[in-house]
Image: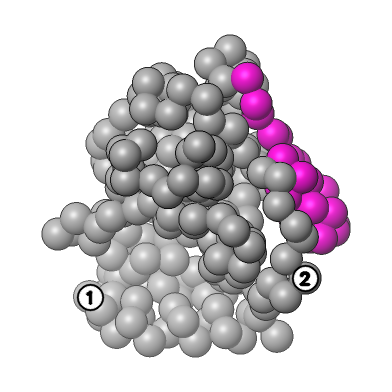
Amino acid sequence: MKEVYIHVGYPKCASSFLQRNVFPYLKNVNFIYNRVENKYGILYPHFVSLCELYEGKNLISCEQLTGNSFVHNKYCNGFEIAERLKRLYHNAGIIIIRRNKDLWLRSLYKQFCSDARRAKCVSGYQDWYDNHLDHNLLRFDEYEKKVRELFDEVLVIRFEEFCRDNDKGIEKICDFIGVDFPYDYDRSRRNVALNNNQLKFIRLSGKIGVYKFTNKYMLGFFRRMNRK
């Protein structure tokens, strides 16, 4: 029997940490990191057919299944994706991690500006909010209600609670899937946010045209600094 569990997001809600540090360590679970990259370097969810899944427990993870954060990366919004997931995986269990909206927006803005090519396109936070953010993502409560209407099994975890106690949050996910807690999971931090001075440097490098160097070398250097 094929059991399907889907971690749908949201972005900037511990997704990278779970995908790289936790989910691969779950025993007796077929973990699928469910994204593909197009020729422009934009990541999209890839829908795996039921026949491609293993007998037993399958865990699919892609934070963009709630919808893409940026309006220019056009594809279905989270509500349409949820309906498609229901058609593909009728009895799936859904995992959602959501956070305080204001803090989430600030984190998403920093992520946008961490790519020097994109950072040069915005004059500031308000410009990004008005012209680049897909506002469908702001409908947290509506989205959760929609998912609960479609699926019988839904687990919602608050990002703030997860940050206070990683083990407790992971234990909830394991109980939901029905697997043992992965005591050997990787506890290092992932995708650490940049500080304001680092963001200013990246935006400047985009404007003067040295974004290739910044994206390849400086971004990783900044994030390694911030992990310490």
**For residue 141, side relative to residue 191 (left or right):** right
Q: Which mark is residue 183?
A: 2
Q: Amino acid at mark 1?
A: Gly
Number of the front mark, 1 or 2: 2
In the rendered image, residue 93, in percent from the top left (x then y), is placed at 59, 32
The colour scheme used to paint the residues is: one colour
Q: Which mark is residue 209?
A: 1
Q: Which mark is residue 227?
A: none
Q: Is residue 162 magenta?
A: yes
Extreme residue toward the left, this view: 39
Q: Which residue is at a point 48% across and 70% down the rendered structure image?
A: 200
**Local SS, label 2:** loop
Q: Is residue 159 magenta?
A: yes
- Residue 5 falls in which quadrant of the image? top right
Q: Amino acid at mark 2?
A: Tyr
**Local SS, label 1:** loop
In the rendered image, residue 189, in percent from the top left (x then y), is placed at 65, 73
- Distance CA(mark 1)–CA(mark 2): 45 Å
Extreme residue toward the top, this view: 149
User: Which stretch did the figure color magenta?
Assistant: 152-176
| Residue in front for this viewpoint, 193 or 180 | 180
